Amino acid sequence: MTHPSGVRGFIFIYLALLALLALTFGVSFFNLSGSWGLILNLSISFLKAILIGLFFMHLNRSPGLTRVFAAAGFCWLAVLLSLALTDYVSRGWIALPGRWP
Amino acid sequence: MGSPLNAGVQPQEQFKSIEQQHEAATQGMWIFLATEILFFGGIFLAYFIYRRSYSIGFERMSEMLDSFLGTLNTAILLTSSLTMALSVRAVQLEKKGSLILFLVLTLIFGVAFLTIKGFEYSEDFKNKLVLGPSFPFHGLEAVHMEMFLLIYYVMTLIHAVHLLVGICLVSLMVVKTVRSRCLPALYSPIEVIGLYWHFVDVVWLFLYPLLYLAGRPHI
Amino acid sequence: MRSSHDYLNSDVTIRSWLCTRDHKRIALLYLISITLFFFIGGAAAAIIRLNLMTPSGGLVSAETYNRLFTMHGVIMVWFFLIPSIPTVLGNFLVPLMIGAKDLAFPRLNLLSWYIYILGGSFTFAAIVAGGVDTGWTFYTPYSTAFSSSFVLLTAAGVFITGFSSILTGLNFIVTIHRMRAPGLTWFRLPIFIWSMWATSVIMVLATPVLAITLLLMAVERVFKVGIFDPALGGDPLLFQHLFWFYSHPAVYIMILPGMGVVSEIICCFARKRIFGYAFVALSSVAIAVIGFFVWGHHMFVSGQSAYAGVVFSFLSFLVSVPSAIKVFNWTATLYKGNIQLRTPMVYALGFIGLFTVGGLTGLFLAVLAVDVHVHDTYFVIAHFHFIMVGGMVSAYLGGIHFWWPKITGKIYPEKWGIAAALLLFFGFNLTFFPQFILGYLGMPRRYHSYPPEFQIYHVMSTLGSSILGLGYLLPFSYLLWSLRFGKDAGPNDWNASGLEWKTSSPPPPHNFESTPLVTQEAYDYGKSS
């Protein structure tokens, strides 16, 4: 890159991150049904991660390949989580003795 | 395109130019961060599957953690990310004084995080929130609560170790900066360490709600 | 004629070797280390096969037998197969093949070797102390709550060595992306580079999961907690999911480099460019990616949900497709080629046949209903040895022979080479084909004794293994012999295509006198064909 990002931009992102943190904490005072609380929290965390990645970690001005590397880890984690969860989610679908839990 | 920010620095002999070296370094660090995502990912899988099955125990145990301190720590780490980003900016602008200031601030916030975490652990120990015979709860739900506690300790300890490594690296950069006569040569290392630091912050951003807010509102 | 200034004789002190940053020297450091581990793992196998000569298995106790097959697996998988081609041939050839002076991070490369040695030392210490008896798969809760063997020491060795893998993969990926010579576009790369890239992606993304798995296993064992222990509320299948998420892609770390080597050898000794270059190149990527989606096929009978089993079974069928594409394309490359049956080619042809058998039997195992019967039997053992030994070791030896003149500047004795390759092929088949039958008939794996009706197959297998052993000892001997007494090699005695052949044998320390400029496709053999 040929010129540094501006201070104001960083401060703005920082304040946005703090606002999202306040949102996360604030939402936790409310009773959300089922796993919506978890989903909301994770979504906000993702948003914070994207902000940090794009602006603090300069992904917004990095070559495409760098962004692919950045995304790859998350994608592979998604594979691990989703395929492993297919087991746990579907274990109860057939009544078998001694299944966990 | 303009000349790069660290032009004039001599690249290592396997590289054709300093830009090639810098790109290699940042891409190499991103690959390393991908490995870290998968490293932490294993324990995230454990968290999700046990939370699914042991939800009541998880929520009860999570509630006993100090969510105020957890939130404060998250804010501290976010601030350290800001100062780290400003450090990278300072080295790009070759402002030695600002660079040292922001690196040191990053260090201070990192150490503050670890201090508060340490304090939390000591409170946990005082409240007997430990695994083993002194765990104050009993019965089936206690097993579930202990699972949460185990994952909590493993996740936060591994995170703390990573943060400690980051603190050592940033300290090293402070020393190098103070002694440096050619600031552009530090651009690559500081940017790359910055990437690592931000990553450690991002991991915490996921740990925080999963560990501290799972039991809220109070059940 | 030997130059006085090649990478081997430019500095002959021990320190210059142990502190080298030269990828070529690091490759040789690895060559020596993995050969050492290969013989240790092979010794374990020899004792296993001797024990299995008689149904009562009286050579060693059942306890010792458990430790033997565990150490055989641990060493062969992590200290031989996974590093082999990437760290020896990959380290040596990747910069040369792309026209670079070295890898992107030479010091990291040396560090990788030291980490490998450190991890190997831990594991070696575990062997000397008495070994571990959990199987190379470390299944819980046996490994964490019941085994009294040296689990932690072994796991520590594997954990540490994993970082060697990660750093090597990282190095290769960055190098291949950033340091290709001018004109060397992706689709002009040798297939070996594509396969090294794909292997590196797997190394980088899969190995960290092994690391966290071993760490959690260690935590459970040391602190007596229950992440994976059902008695303490844990799920043993969680361990298996995490373990196999790494260990299945790991088998592709082991085979993909071999496939790359075979592509290079086939083209050179059929004097033809590879048939369907893009398909062969991209099939390496497909194997790397799809290989991450199939790990549950190791867990069909473990208690995993049957629905997940169906998903993993289907995905396992899918992953065989790119491998099959390669086999078809190699065959098409051979068709109407000007075949020269030199030693590397004999190994490569053996690979194609044996890998095909191994791969097809993998498909049998991917069928849920079949797996119920042959899981944990010798059928599985035969399957993976066909791939790993029949395939991978053949490819490794073929590659060593093919590039030996380049690496050492010496020529090995060709007749001995052919003899050894044939001995290996014959000995291998005699060792492992009877094991398919054994498994089908019901002989379980990891048993030190068995019913008498199985003896004939075990005797054949043990006999075969002694011939196989000879097939390993021969190259070890004559390759060493050639270092002192072999004829000097020219820069390109094979008349092969590829940038590595455009520099001297052995290459100078900085690989090329001047940066090559690439203007042609890969494999410019016989342009008119």
Image: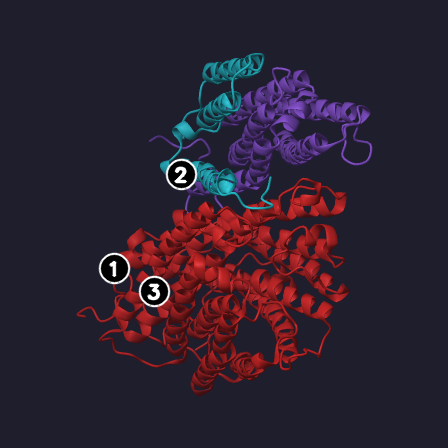
Q: Chain of mark 1?
A: C
Q: Is residue B83 above or below residue C491?
A: above
Label located before the other in sequence (1 or 3): 3
Q: Nearer the viewer, mark 1 or mark 2?
A: 2
Classify residue C512 as left or right of residue B182.
left
Instruction: Name the spot of residue C411 as percent of width and height, x first.
Output: 45, 80
- On residue C520, which mark appears? 1
Q: Is residue A100 above or below residue C95?
A: above
Task: Confirm whether circles 1 and 2 share one chain.
Answer: no
Chain A, colour shown: cyan
Q: Could you tell me the amino acid type at mark 3?
A: Gly
Q: Colour of chain C?
A: red
Question: Of helix, strand and loop, which one carries label 3?
Answer: loop
Mark 1, residues whose alpha carbon is within 10 Å: few (<14), some, or many (≥20)?
A: few
Q: Which residue is mark 2?
A: A68
Q: Residue at x 76, y 23 (%)?
A: B119
The residue at 36%/52% (across/down) is C286
Residue position marked by numbered label 3 in the rendering: C498
State whether residue C201 appears in this view.
no
Q: Please check whether the numbered discs 2 and 3 fall on a single chain.
A: no
In the displayed structure, C241 sits above or below C317; it is above
Which residue is at the front of the view, B103 or C207? Answer: C207
Task: Tell me whether circle 1 and circle 3 mark residues in contact (CB < 8 Å).
Answer: no
Q: Which chain is purple?
A: B
